[in-house]
Amino acid sequence: MLKRQLPRYLPSAEELPDSDETPVDNELQELIPGLLKAILLILWAERMDWFFGIDMGIYYDPDQPAIVPDAFLSLGVERFYDEELRPSYVLWDENVVPTLVLEVVSQNYRKEYSQKLADYQELGILYYVIYSSRRRRKPHLEVHKLVDGKYELQSGNPIWMPEIGLGMGCERGNYSGVTREWLYWYDAEGKRYLTPEEKVKDADQRASQEAQRADRLAQRLRELGIDPDI
């Protein structure tokens, strides 16, 4: 819940800028969050109590500019307001601080380990995720959890987040025609959830296997003198 002292007049999301006019540094800053959201749209298709924002402003004070992470996840909020959707995420309207924020480190340093870390920590965001595939000696994925008001780096890959009911990790795969390391969601046993493309292929494969089994059964019945079409 939002605890910050705010002025009496609070503008709505429609009155606030919905963009900081700053372009993303590279395509991965769109594709990586996009894949995570695409998986959630399948995994939580029946749930209406979550929101996953990509390159969207989080307003925490009407007198301050929005914080714009590459992506964030909020739980316990309305998934959709209306057909216009959210132009931004306004804390005094939502009254729910995001549970997780994600920053994809680009070639240009954007204060992921200084100002942004301090901002997210002050807002009380439970999980701060930083991903950088350019690291050579350190893990590409870092998940920081807020413990007693300070972020603590979690270990492992994937890393289970019980408050969300999901794990996050990185491994090589194919998405949008690109084979490389991607971020994925995982279950409590560390099993990766399928991407939309993998779900389609899996369904097609299962259908093909079922058709083959049906053909073999029909052939066996014919060999026994039974017409399977009757």
Image (tube, rainbow, N blue to C red):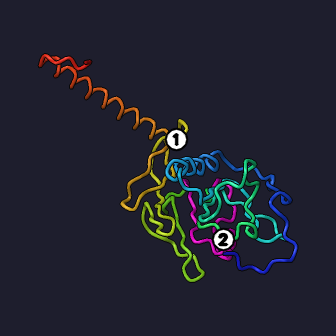
- Check residue 120 in the rendering and tell me which mark sits there, or answer none: 2
Residue drawn at the location 53% of the way across and 75% of the way down: 152
Does residue 166 appear to the left or right of 228 in the view shown? right
Residue 121: x and y in percent read: 64, 75
Quadrant hosting residue 77: bottom right
Identity of the amino acid at label 1? Tyr
Answer with mark 1 or mark 2, whichever residue precedes in sequence.
Answer: 2
Asked if residue 114 shows in the view, the reply is: no
In the image, the segment drawn in magenta is 105-134
In this view, 172 is above or below 160: above
Q: Residues within 10 Å of mark 2 (few under 14, many from 20)?
A: many
Amino acid found under the numbered disc labelled 2: Tyr
Q: Position of residue 61 (x, y in %)?
A: 79, 71
Q: Does 107 sit left or right of 201 as displayed?
A: right
Query: In the figure, 177 relative to 186: above or below?
Result: above
Residue under label 1, please give it. 175
Q: Quadrant of residue 188?
A: bottom left
Label 1: few (<14), some (14–19) or many (≥20) C-alpha neighbours in 10 Å: some
Which residue is depicted at the point 45% across and 40% down?
198
- Magenta region includes residue 111: yes
